[in-house]
Image (cartoon, coloured by chain):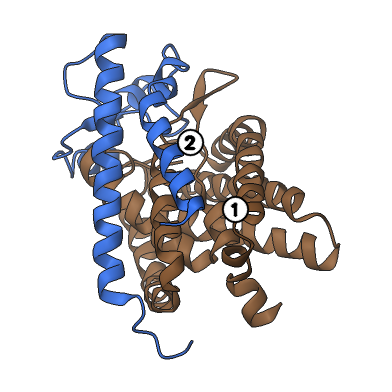
């Protein structure tokens, strides 16, 4: 492995460990704009949103919803849940990437 | 910038899946041209993109924003590589972490995996090749323009919903576009500029050979 990739890999490691910064820094903030759950939006606008209600829960099989272990609400547990999510997510992303690369890279004719 | 399920009506969702089909075809075909020596770099940058999106930053007014990393990949490898990376990252985020959505997946890939890296990349190219501006400065400006444009695009998609079919995103364009733009103009944009400039500077300095391998110098340079 080349030096640049090694360094970037080390950065990835550091980013996993420090990831709780990404929730602690915004602990008392609301979600990103346009990412609130249905009930919150309905409360904000003061009426029902039938379309949104129907689609919002179309996928409810997220293992680590909002990058956390369900029920780990306090800052310490949420931080641990966040690190677990960072590890799991990085692993899944890499797995999918290398699976894809295995089937495609180097099979080109145009280059 | 991850539009959740329910915010976009069925027509908008279907529209973006249709738009993404040829783009995905082109991007995955492009992947065949990735050089073996670029494979680890793209892998680690894809992981970087996933992680950098976990760093939520406070936006004045009480919301949050994050950077994406798409322009970094576009400059260091190719904007098509960024499309492939973000296709992977956004799929994992939607399925396993409930960030983004299934119905809105194509729209999210379009914003963060197409608009963002291509606008970032062509801004960078224009600045370096036409205006002969410094590479690192251009990379930062490219990332800034890229993420702000992508955010405005997301704002437009959300804001047209009340005109198309009520019951989905309730906020019209005059609310959604400024909200998305401001969050990225003041918070995520500057962060993207600094991070992108730093990573591009580092890779260019330590691996000029990898830097020279980019499609930019090979095809049209």
Confirm whether residue A103 shows in the render: yes
Q: Residues within 10 Å of mark 2 (few under 14, many from 20)?
A: many
Q: Residue placed at 52% from the left, 39% from the top? A: B67
Specify the quadrant of the image occupied by residue A31. Answer: top left
Q: Considering only vertical position in the picture, is B218 above or below A43? A: below
Q: Nearer the viewer, residue B75 or B146?
A: B75
Which label was assigned to residue B95?
none
| Element marked by disc 1 | helix
Q: Residues within 10 Å of mark 1 (few under 14, many from 20)?
A: many
Left or right of A110? Residue B87 is: left
The answer to whether A28 appears left or right of A74 in the picture is right
| Chain in brown (letter) | B
Placement of B178 over or under B19, stated as above or below: above
- Furthest residue in direction right, as rendered: B131
Question: Looking at the picture, how far across and down is residue A96, in whole percent?
Answer: 25, 57
Residue, x 40% and y 59% (percent of image)? B40
Give the distance between the C-alpha atoms of the residues marked 2 and 1, in whole angstroms.
42 Å
User: Could you say where residue A58 lies in the image, as x and y percent from the top left?
Assistant: 18, 44
Mark 1 lies on residue: B203
Residue B10: give x, y in percent of width and height: 31, 55
Q: Earlier in the sequence, mark 2 or mark 1?
A: 2
Q: Is residue B42 above or below residue B160?
A: below
The tint of chain A in the picture is: blue
Q: Quadrant of the C terminus of chain B?
A: bottom right
State whether residue A70 is above or below residue B212.
above
Q: Residue beneath label 2, please?
A: B171
Report the residue at 61% width, 53% height from top: B206
């Amino acid at each position: 492995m080349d030096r640049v990739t090694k360094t970037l890999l080390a950065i990835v490691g550091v980013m996993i460990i420090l990831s709780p910064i990404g929730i602690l820094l915004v602990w008392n903030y609301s979600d990103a704009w346009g990412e609130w759950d249905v009930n919150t939006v309905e409360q904000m606008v003061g009426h029902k949103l039938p379309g949104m209600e129907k689609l919002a829960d179309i996928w409810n099989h997220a293992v680590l919803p909002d990058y956390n272990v369900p029920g780990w609400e306090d800052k310490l547990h949420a931080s641990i849940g966040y690190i677990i999510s960072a590890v799991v997510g990085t692993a899944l992303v890499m797995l999918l990437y290398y699976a894809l690369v295995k089937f495609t890279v180097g099979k080109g004719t145009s280059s | 910038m991850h539009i959740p399920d329910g915010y976009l009506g069925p027509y908008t969702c279907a529209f973006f899946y249709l738009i993404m089909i040829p783009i995905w075809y082109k991007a995955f075909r492009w992947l065949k041209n990735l050089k073996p020596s670029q494979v680890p770099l793209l892998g680690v940058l894809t992981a970087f993109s996933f992680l950098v999106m976990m760093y939520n930053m406070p936006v004045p007014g009480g919301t949050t924003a994050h950077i994406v990393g798409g322009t970094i990949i576009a400059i260091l490898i190719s904007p098509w590589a960024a499309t492939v990376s973000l296709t992977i990252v956004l799929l994992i985020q939607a399925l396993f972490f409930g960030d983004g959505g299934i119905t809105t997946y194509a729209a999210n890939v379009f914003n963060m995996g197409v608009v963002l890296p291509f606008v970032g990349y062509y801004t960078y190219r224009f600045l370096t090749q036409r205006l002969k501006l410094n590479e690192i400065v251009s990379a930062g400006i490219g990332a800034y323009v890229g993420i702000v444009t992508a955010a405005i695009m997301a704002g437009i998609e959300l804001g047209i919903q009340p005109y198309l079919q009520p019951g989905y995103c309730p906020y019209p364009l005059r609310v959604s576009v400024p909200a998305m733009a401001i969050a990225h103009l003041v918070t995520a944009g500057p962060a993207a500029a600094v991070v992108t400039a730093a990573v591009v500077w580092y890779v260019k300095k330590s691996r000029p050979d990898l830097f020279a391998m980019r499609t930019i110098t090979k095809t049209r340079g």
